[in-house]
Structure formats: C-alpha cells, structure tokens
Image (cartoon, rainbow, N blue to C red):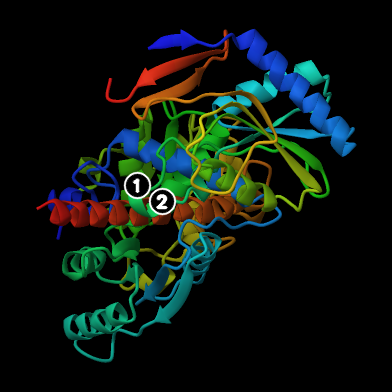
Amino acid sequence: MTALLDMDRLLDDLEAGLRKKLEQRGVTDPALIGIRTGGVWLADAMSKRLGLNEPWGELDISFYRDDFSRIGLNPKVKPSSLPFSTEDRDIILIDDVIMSGRTIRAAMNEIFDYGRPASIILATLVDLGARELPVQPDVTGQVLALQPQQRVKLRGPDPLHIELQEAGK
Amino acid sequence: MTANDPSSTSLQLTADGQLRHFLTLDGLSRALLTEILDTADSFIEVGERSIKKVPLLRGRTVVNLFFESSTRTRSTFELAAKRLSADVLNLDINTSATSKGESLSDTLLNLEAMASDMFVVRHSQSGAPHFIAESVTPGVAIINAGDGRHAHPTQAMLDMLTIRQHKGEFEGLKVAIVGDVLHSRVARSQIRALNELGAAEVRIIAPATLLPRDVESLGCTVEYDMARGMKDLDVVIMLRLQKERMEGALLPSEREFYRLYGLSREKLALADPECIVMHPGPINRGVEIESAVADGPQSVILNQVTNGIAIRMAVMSMAMGGQMTERNRKLAGRAEG
C-alpha cells in the first residue's frame, strides 16, 4: 500500500473545477450529496471550500446496487440522509473514485426517489477509466491509469489520503 | 418440531451464515439480530421519502400464504413486499376443508408452478413454516408470519426495533411481558430475542393458568402480582387476551382479568417514569389495557406498526439475498466442475 497523489492539490483542482462548472451552468445555490463513505468526506471538504451554508446529504446506495442478485444485501447498510428536498434543486453529486459507473447509476436512481432534481453535476476525485456504463464525471481531480490488479481507495476523514492497493494483498 | 430444534439453524442460514429463510429466532446470533435491526433502520428512512420504494425485489413474486387470518400482519407484509418492488399475491386459505398435510403440499406445488420466489406463511399449527421450508424448491425463501404457539419472529423483531429506538441499547433493561403467555407465539420469540440481545431481566407477569409449564426454562422470571412486577420496569409489553382461544375456564371473567392484569394508569405509575408501553395489537381496550394508557404519552403502539413494515422489508430482502447468492454459488460451482 502506497500513499500517492498530493491531496491538497487534488482538492484544489476539484474545487476549481466545481466553481468553473457552477459558473458555466449558472448555478448559484447547489445542494451537495456525497456517496458513502469516501464521497461524504469529500462533500464535507467541498462544502467548506465552496462556502455552502446548507448541510450536505449522504447516500448509501446499497438498496439500489445492480449486483443484489449476485451478492445479496450489504450487511452494513446505513440509512441515507438528505436534509433537503431534491425536487427542482441543482445537485452536486460527489464520490471518491469512478470506475465502472455503476455506483453513480445507482446513486442517481436513488436521488430521483427523493424528488426530481433540476440538474446534477457529477464530481469525482479520481477517475480510473474502465467504464462499463455511459456515465462521465463533469469534474475530476485526477485521471489515473492503473494496472489491472491495482485499486485505489480514499482513506480519512482526517487526514484524507489516497491509498494504492494491489489486489489480493 | 420443537422450539429449540437445532435443525432450524442449518435450515434458515446459508453455509456462510446469511439468512435464507426466516422461521424462528432460535439459533440466530446477537450479531445477526443486530444486522436485522440495523437494516430495518435504513428501511425506516425509505418509508419517509417521496417515493417509498427500492428496487431490491423487482421482478420477484412474493406469496402471502395465510392459513389463519390476520389483517395487520398480512397488510404490513404486503406493503413491505411492495416497497421492495416485488409482485405480491395474497392467499387466505381455510384449512378446515381437506386433510391438512395433503392440501398444503398441493397448494405449494401449484404456487411453485407460478414461479414464486418467497412464501410468507401464517399457520395455526406450530412448525408449518419449517415443514414448507424443508419441502420447497431450493431458491424459494420462507418467512414465518406466525405459527401456532411456536413463534412470531417478525413481530418480536419489530418490538426489539421499537425498544432500541426508545432506549438506545438492551444492556441493563428490565422488560416485562404481561398477560396470556400460554397462547402467545409472540412471547416466546420476544423472550428469546431479549435474552440474546442482552436485556438485564425478562419478567413474565401472568396468572398461573395462562403460563406454559416450562415457562422459566425460556429464560425469564415469573411474577403473579402485577403491582410487584411493575417495579423499575423500562418496558412493558402487553399481550392480547386471545379471546377466540379462551376455551375452558382459564379465567373467571374479563373484568376480573382487567382488575388483576390490565394495564391501568395506576399500575403504570409503579414502573420507571420513562417506561414505554407496547402492545402487538389489536388491543382490547378495557380488557388488557386502559384507553388512556394505550393513547398516552408512554405508549409506542403505533411506532410498532410503522416499524413492522421496516422489519419485514429487512428480513425479506436479507432472505432473498441469501437465496440468490447461494443459487449463484451453486451455478458457479457447476460451471467450474
């Protein structure tokens, strides 16, 4: 396991990308939603950096996963918590890592069960490619090309850092 | 088929300890009971959304197979299945017509031919859900919705969820179960759950005629005098007086029962001031419980109903998940071999 990437710089890039995207879209009052667990730490960080006053939401996508029929229910599911209505809101959806795109599909399905948002901006700290669904982030801290057996994971919350893992170790 | 049949453990759990049926609380660990409660907590949140539905059982068929009528249990199971996106078939079956063993097997064969994925079974005979679980096609999950005097595990778990919501944890809690324990399948499941989850004391308050002979071996203390029994209680669970089963002279009269074992404001005042009042419903006002208590600030009876949906969603999705992972593992094993 190796620590890699400069976290401060990644967060700076993510913040800058989000500010630019919000300005392009003319969004002034976004609501922030993090996908548990890594995305929630990032939601906390971005909420502070963007100066948002509203509390961020947390999603646990366990009830929306597409592999339930293969692996059953996640035994560690926790309640999702959205302290605002998503109806007609501009949402920033944030997660630590995007790969297949399946987590984001599940998260968007769940968000719509709370109400129809006006728009969703997708932000991910690290993009590993290897997409299986047509889902692309609007804002990314860093694109990484990994070896097939390698994985990355955000650790935190204090300090936030990214770990490189070799599969099977 | 006894309450402590060790075969129920291997019957209702997969090789790696996941639920695949939900028949009894016997043999289920504190960790698994806690997992059920935690999962139900997440389903409570789903019930508060604009769209109260998740896609876990989409495309699955759930059959509510009720050989004994029960409006509340059946409707909360139905709602739970629908909130998991399953298709639901409700069958109320009168058992008295033909020989029971034969009609049961035939009914099951017919329902399996309709490609059902889960049977929710309520039966007046103890052990009927076990029997069905043993004979059903692999891949079909059986949920016990109450069998004879044996068990009513989803009711006990929704009671545990209600207690945890109000008290936080089970350690140190003094809980009393009051009334007709003899005819109660709920009481057996409750005693088992409370002991496994670590309650300090489970106290039964009832007249000797309404106690099963082996009551203390279930893991509880017995108190015949309600005023003494109410002392220091954190939770009081009233049982329904099963009027329809009250054959023979077990009680002098309903009025006498209320005087001795009914929960009045005066008796409740003897418990801890924070004591919560529970009842599985339907309540007989003025028989087991005074209206002012049932509707009072310490009553959590309606929370129990809401929690019933969440608990049923939890055990249905966990058992279905267990069945499906097991089936996939077998398919994968066959492919490799």
In the visual, does A6 lie left or right of B173?
right
Q: Is residue A126 above or below residue A114?
A: above
User: To which residue does mark 2 refer?
Assistant: A68
Mark 2, other Cα within 10 Å: few <14 / some 14–19 / many ≥20: many
Q: Given the image, what chain letter belongs to the residue carrying mark 1? A: A
Q: Which residue type does callout 1 highlight?
A: Ile
Given contact means CB atoms under 8 Å apart, are the residues at marks 1 and 2 in contact? yes
User: To which residue does mark 1 refer?
Assistant: A71
The reply to whether residue B148 is in sight is yes
Residue B17 position within the rendered picture, expressed as x and y whole percent measured from the top left: 24, 42
Q: Given the image, what chain letter belongs to the residue carrying mark 2? A: A
Residue A131 position within the rendered picture, expressed as x and y whole percent measured from the top left: 51, 41
Q: Which quarter of the image is occupied by the C terminus of chain A?
A: top left
Q: Which residue type does callout 2 highlight?
A: Phe
Q: Residue furthest bottom?
A: B97
The reply to whether residue B271 is in sight is no
Discs 1 and 2 lie in a common subunit: yes
